[in-house]
């Protein structure tokens, strides 16, 4: 199903919303409520920038761009113009959904064995994550420019004003950023980054310290007046190349031509039903949309609405569906321009039914094998090796006309490659590739190849009611756990009818085809024994989701932000 399916009723969007059950959990605060417009993002200063743009007549796309440029400054550990992202846009007038891929690409000089040792062993991820070798061609500015061309209303340069002002005047380091600076191992490895985040005595700068970033302001000024070309060619591009190739640790292979050739891609959104709702996400090269949707569809034969959130049965069933979907993800999901991804086969009703039949309501399956959807080639399994970090950011904007942006952006792990150029951090997104190009003689779909986009888990999502109205827009950081955070939230919204803030407050659990992970210091840990007796391996872990979202109802908008990070939702 693609956007053409939605066109049949898309123009009705926002007119018919969902009657929200406001059954917030005891400890949850209410969602932010507003009649016209709403912004939810990881930092209040980014939210304020977006609101400023909306009030000046900007569209959701305009406001999202302004917010992202501020996030790259005040939440630099998570996302920025040295990274990439995936964005879904809903146009309230036409009903069209567009999805945009601004994922980083491997340079032309990348090779399938670049993360192997000389004796063909996988290198340790932490050893190659820093420095130049893991830096992909940043995709963010090309994405923002394309989105602005297609959906912007205010002049491009206007969107840069809030971030430039903050970079010039300075901003206070937030507690979360200060914590990330202090606890990130080896962040002081490179001089420019050290000078920015540490004081003259080498101590990590603390919360409340005022940081100015005139270099970032200058970069933004150049792109505000010269467009993204000013980033992808000329002096800024040359400095990015120098930082990557000249890195004192793991020098990289990026050349100016890699930047000059980069393009963002408008792709068809990946849409499918979950019960009576239509769930639209981002297709490959992220595994986010497919794995969320497969998890949900595998669960459709179970009446989750009869189960309580966080109950033993609910956690068991969601874990079992999730492990099946992750097994398929790990084998099949990658950049579709390089390897055929069996999208249709994965969502054929017969395939879903056969796979769902593997779920035993009383017994965990253990580690499962992928299925064989139609159209799948001979590939080897390759589980994701990416851990969750402090990185990645999700923002959602709804404007007064009803247009909506849901946008996840990232520089991969916290502070990316730790390399800075021109006031911003460069990503280490190439570590999202699988390091082994082959396994047991078969090729690994997500192997490194020149020009290829590494598989992601980012999952910006839009949900529509049975009669075509927009119901929810949301997403999260969290590496591969993003998939669990988003799928669990959709179940809580659709099956349990919780309000969006209550959903984001729920304790998290996730199964990535291994142990069932339960969020530490939450009531979920009490389920450990019950789950073990059903055959689950249990891991208690901090599951630091960073969900941000908006619910659209007949009485206006409700915004939610994840209490685990510093996000906030505000509207008017
Ligand atoms: N690089 C990861 C991805 O694209 C995101 C990392 C994170 O969320 O911490 O899926």
Image (cartoon, rainbow, N blue to C red):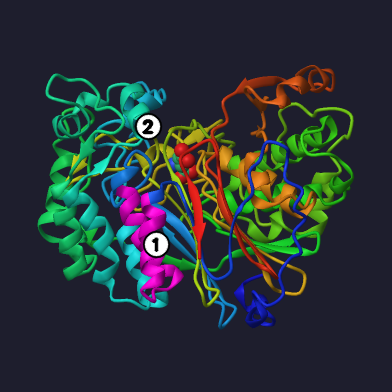
Rendered position, 179 above or below 225: above
- Expressed as whole percent of the image width and height from the top left, the position of residue 342 reads 63, 56
Q: Residue at x 71, y 35 (%)?
A: 369
Q: How many marks?
A: 2
List the single residue furthest toward the left: 235
State the image quarter where residue 28 is shown. Answer: top right
Q: Secondary structure at mark 1?
A: helix
Label of residue 175 in the image: 2
Q: Is residue 50 magenta?
A: yes
Disc 1 from disc 2: Cα separation: 22 Å
The region drawn magenta spans: 45-72
Q: Vertically, is 340 above or below 518?
A: below
Q: Please report contact status of discs 1 and 2: CB closer than 8 Å, yes or no.
A: no
Residue at 33% of width from left, 37% of height from top? 416
Query: Neighbour class for label 2 at 10 Å: few (<14), some, many (≥20)?
Result: some
In percent of width and height, residue 549 lies at 57, 54
Q: Nearer the viewer, residue 30 or 257?
A: 30
> In terms of secondary structure, what is the magenta stretch mainly?
helix
Q: Is residue 409 left or right of residue 127?
A: right
Residue under the point 65% across and 51% down = 500
Q: Is residue 230 magenta?
A: no
Assess disc 1: are there few (<14), some (14-19) or many (≥20) residues with their C-alpha within 10 Å of its C-alpha: many
Q: Where residue 430 sits in the image (x, y, percent)?
A: 37, 41
Residue 239 higher or lower than 557, as above or below: above
Taking the spot 53% from the left edge, 46% from the top edge, the residue there is 476
Q: Residue 50, labelled with which disc?
A: 1
Res 549 label: none
Q: Is residue 106 in view? A: no
């Amino acid at each position: 199903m693609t956007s053409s399916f939605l066109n049949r009723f898309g123009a009705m969007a926002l007119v018919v919303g969902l009657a929200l059950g406001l059954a917030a959990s005891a400890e949850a605060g209410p969602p932010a409520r507003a009649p016209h417009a709403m912004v939810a993002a990881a930092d209040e200063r980014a939210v304020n920038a977006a609101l400023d743009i909306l009030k000046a007549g900007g569209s959701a796309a305009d406001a999202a761009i302004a917010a992202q440029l501020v996030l790259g400054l005040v939440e630099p550990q998570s996302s920025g113009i040295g990274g990439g992202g995936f964005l879904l846009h809903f146009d309230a007038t036409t009903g069209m959904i567009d999805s945009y891929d601004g994922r980083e690409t491997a340079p032309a000089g990348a090779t399938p064995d670049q993360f192997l040792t000389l004796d063909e062993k996988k290198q340790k991820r932490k050893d190659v994550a820093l420095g130049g070798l893991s830096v992909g061609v940043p995709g963010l500015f090309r994405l923002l420019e394309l989105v602005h061309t297609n959906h912007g209303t205010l002049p491009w340069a206007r969107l840069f004003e809030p971030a430039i002002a903050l970079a010039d005047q300075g901003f206070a380091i937030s507690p979360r950023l200060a914590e990330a600076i202090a606890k990130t191992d080896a962040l002081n490895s490179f001089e420019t980054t050290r000078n920015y985040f540490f004081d003259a005595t080498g101590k990590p700068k603390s919360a409340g310290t005022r940081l100015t970033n005139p270099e970032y302001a200058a970069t933004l000024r150049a792109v505000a007046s010269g467009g993204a070309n000013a980033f992808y060619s000329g002096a800024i591009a040359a400095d990015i190349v120098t930082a990557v190739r000249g890195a004192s640790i793991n020098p990289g292979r990026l050349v100016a031509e890699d930047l000059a050739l980069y393009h963002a891609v408008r792709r068809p959104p990946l849409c499918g039903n979950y019960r009576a709702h239509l769930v639209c996400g981002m297709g490959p090269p992220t595994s986010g949309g497919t794995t969320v949707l497969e998890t949900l569809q595998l669960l459709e034969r179970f009446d989750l609405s009869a189960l309580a959130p966080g109950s033993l049965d609910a956690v068991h069933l969601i874990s079992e569906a999730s492990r099946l979907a992750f097994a398929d993800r790990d084998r099949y999901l990658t950049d579709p321009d390089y390897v055929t991804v069996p999208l249709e086969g994965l969502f054929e009703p017969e395939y879903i039914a056969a796979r769902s039949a593997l779920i035993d309501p009383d017994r965990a399956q253990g580690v499962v094998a992928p299925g064989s959807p139609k159209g799948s080639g001979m590939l080897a399994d390759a589980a994701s090796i990416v851990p969750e970090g402090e990185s990645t950011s999700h923002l959602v904007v709804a404007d007064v006309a009803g247009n909506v942006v849901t946008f996840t952006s990232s520089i991969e792990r916290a502070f990316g490659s730790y390399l800075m150029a021109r006031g911003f951090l460069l990503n280490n997104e190439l570590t999202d590739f699988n390091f082994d190009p082959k396994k047991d003689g078969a090729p690994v779909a997500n192997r490194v190849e020149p020009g290829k986009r590494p598989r992601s888990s980012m999952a910006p999502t839009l949900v529509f009611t049975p009669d075509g109205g927009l119901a929810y827009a949301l997403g999260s950081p969290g590496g591969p756990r993003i998939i669990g955070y988003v799928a669990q939230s959709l179940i809580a919204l659709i099956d349990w009818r919780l309000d969006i803030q209550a959903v984001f407050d729920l304790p998290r659990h996730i199964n990535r085809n291994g142990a069932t992970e339960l969020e530490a210091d939450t009531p979920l840990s009490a389920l450990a024994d019950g789950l073990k007796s059903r055959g689950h391996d249990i891991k208690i872990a901090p599951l630091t989701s960073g969900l941000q979202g908006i619910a659209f109802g007949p009485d206006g908008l409700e915004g939610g932000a994840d209490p685990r990070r510093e996000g906030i939702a505000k509207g008017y």
